[in-house]
């Protein structure tokens, strides 16, 4: 879902306008849309993913209180990055001020450890705990919201995006207000790393959270995002203390790769480096998509270091992945690799559920591919030929050239990229949509200044704990269970509302049109 929405947003950004629009039309539309978001939608400078026009219901990945803003993409940090992109494209100080408001909202909600939670509740800890005990606890499939914890998370890129925004806005005008929270964020990444180089999903540890939050986490590319941020810090600020952290992070990848004949990785690993399960629908197994992602990281590590140990096992790993490919099936739309592989047997395993809510429901696995979960992919698309080509190209590249281009060479006070928005993830937001052309984006902005969007994602309002016995219905493959389940789900009857992702996609399209002129 994340990769698909990211690709869609990038496509919107890169789409060429069907007819030329004047710069004045584009700038006027951008400014009107942004003023509406900043002055009528934002809460203390921050944003959720979507809301009804009257604000009576608001959602991040799950329903939010009126006092909340969302950190998890595409949330407050994503908006801050977009505002800075617009500032760079137009020179209009209003966009910098909007980015500053978003960044200050994130600073206000920064955990004392230096990271961020999925959201910020300006009503305080008691309100947050009440949300977890009601809306969060009854979202059957959203297990990360079942437990309150006084810590921060690397999950779903919220902390990663927020750290990058603080770095970016600090470098923009060297506003000293941001230096201390930026330093706390840098320290968060360094201090939370285990001696073996891995990172937990959440930190500091909390007795209120399941054990999987403390495991070495590859899910959601935690290490990749942390390494990217630390490299940005090193290249732009010359902070030398991040280098040992980066090198340790590299080393945990080969250390956790399993031996032949199953040279893969799990979503998470124990501190002794062995594979582990995580959420109840993430069993102890090897994960094909994580293995492919980690291989890409190993190729990048070789590109950065010219150390051949990082690519020594690439051929055998690709051969193993290829051996797992299923016969083509149009229903899978190119996703021909089972997500989970049983350790020891190499058999695909499939996750199912029974029941109707968090009270009576249960997840389980077997070898039957029928009726898999609707909210968690049972199969993955992996481009093995592309990985082989990248491996062969790297092997043919002179070592000296790799080292000369390495981001680990001496820092040079490099500027950050001018634009970030096409590199940002839109997360699990099902509402993302955009105009096809700049002309359509200009014409579809309504009189109030927002783009009407069918809110294809909705949720049941909280109404108390669910029944102990399932009501009639088949909830095995749905995104939501019975009426007590507060999990988000796609609806066939969307209402029109305000979507942050739609705003971002249309703004990105207009920004690209400005850049082409």
Image (tube, rainbow, N blue to C red):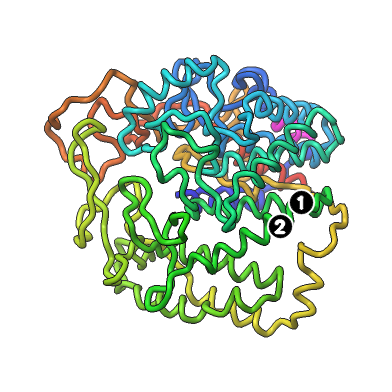
Quadrant hosting residue 296: bottom right
Q: Closest to the observer: 193 or 44?
A: 193
User: Within 10 angstroms of label 2, few (less than 14), some, or many (20 or more) residues?
Assistant: few
Other-residue count near label 1 (Cα within 10 Å), few / some / many at <14 / 14–19 / ≥20: few
Which residue shows up at 50% across the image and 53% down it? Answer: 3
Q: Residue at coordinates 75% horizontally, 38% vertically from top-left?
A: 183
In the foreground, 122 or 259: 259
Q: Is residue 178 visible?
A: yes
Viewer-nearest residue: 335 or 343:
343
Res. 119 mark: none
> Distance of mark 1 from mark 2, alpha carbons?
7 Å
Instruction: Identify the residue position indicated by label 2 in the image.
Output: 244
Q: Which mark is residue 241?
A: 1
Judge whether 271 appears above or below 302 on screen. above
Q: Is residue 283 left or right of residue 242?
A: left
- Residue 88: percent from left, percent from top: 80, 41
Q: For numbered disc 2, what is the local secondary structure?
A: helix
Does residue 53 appear left or right of residue 401 in this picture?
A: left
Region of the chain picked out in magenta, as a range: 24-31
Answer whether residue 25 is magenta in the image: yes
Inspect the magenta stretch and tell me whether residue 474 lies in it: no
Identified at 20% across, 35% down, the residue is 356
Q: Quadrant of residue 406?
A: bottom right
- State whether the magenta stretch is mostly helix, strand or loop: helix
Question: For numbered disc 1, what is the local secondary structure?
Answer: helix
Q: Taking 288 as reference, is 369 left or right?
A: left
Residue 460 on image: x %, y %: 32, 25
Mark 1 in CB contact with mark 2 (< 8 angstroms): yes
């Amino acid at each position: 879902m994340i990769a698909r929405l990211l690709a869609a947003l990038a496509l919107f950004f890169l789409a060429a306008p069907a007819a030329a629009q004047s710069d004045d039309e584009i700038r006027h539309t951008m400014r009107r849309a942004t003023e509406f978001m900043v002055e009528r939608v934002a809460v203390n400078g921050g944003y959720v993913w979507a809301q009804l026009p009257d604000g009576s219901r608001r959602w991040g990945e799950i329903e939010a209180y009126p006092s909340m803003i969302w950190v998890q993409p595409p949330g407050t940090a994503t908006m801050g990055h977009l505002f800075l992109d617009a500032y760079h494209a137009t020179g209009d100080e209003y966009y910098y001020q909007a980015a500053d408001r978003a960044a200050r909202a994130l600073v206000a909600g920064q955990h004392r450890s230096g990271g961020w939670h999925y959201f910020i509740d300006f009503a305080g800890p008691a309100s947050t705990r009440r949300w977890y005990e009601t809306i969060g606890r009854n979202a059957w499939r959203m297990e990360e919201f079942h437990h309150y914890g006084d810590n921060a998370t690397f999950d779903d890129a919220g902390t990663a995006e927020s750290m990058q925004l603080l770095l970016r806005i600090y470098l923009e005008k060297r506003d000293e207000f941001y230096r201390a929270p930026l330093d706390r964020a840098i320290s968060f990444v360094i201090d939370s790393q285990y001696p073996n180089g891995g990172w937990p999903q959440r930190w500091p540890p909390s007795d209120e959270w399941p054990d999987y939050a403390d495991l070495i986490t590859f899910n959601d590319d935690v290490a990749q995002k942390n390494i990217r941020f630390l490299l940005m810090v090193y290249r732009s600020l010359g902070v030398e203390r991040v280098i040992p952290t980066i090198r340790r992070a590299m080393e945990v990848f080969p250390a956790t790769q399993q031996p032949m004949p199953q040279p893969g990785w799990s979503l998470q690993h124990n501190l002794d480096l062995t594979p582990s399960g995580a959420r109840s629908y993430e069993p102890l197994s090897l994960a094909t998509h994580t293995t492919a992602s980690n291989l890409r990281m190993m190729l990048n590590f070789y590109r950065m270091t010219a150390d051949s140990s990082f690519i020594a096992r690439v051929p055998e790993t690709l051969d193993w992945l290829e051996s797992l490919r299923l016969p083509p099936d149009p229903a899978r739309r190119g996703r021909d690799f089972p997500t989970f592989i049983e350790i020891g047997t190499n058999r695909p395993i499939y996750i199912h559920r029974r029941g109707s809510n968090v009270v009576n429901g249960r997840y389980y696995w077997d070898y039957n591919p029928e009726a898999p979960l609707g909210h968690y992919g049972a199969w993955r698309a992996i481009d093995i030929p592309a990985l082989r080509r990248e491996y062969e190209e790297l092997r043919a590249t002179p070592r000296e050239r790799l080292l000369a281009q390495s981001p680990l060479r001496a820092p040079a006070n490099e500027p950050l990229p001018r634009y970030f928005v096409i590199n940002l993830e839109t997360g699990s937001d099902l509402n993302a949509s955009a105009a096809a052309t700049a002309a359509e984006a200009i014409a579809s902005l309504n009189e109030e200044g927002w783009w009407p969007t069918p809110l294809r994602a909705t949720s049941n309002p909280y109404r108390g704990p669910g029944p102990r016995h399932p009501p009639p219905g088949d909830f095995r493959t749905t995104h939501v269970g019975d009426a007590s389940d507060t999990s988000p789900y796609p609806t066939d009857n969307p209402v029109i509302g305000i979507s942050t992702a739609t705003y971002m996609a249309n703004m990105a399209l207009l920004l690209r049109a400005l850049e082409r002129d």
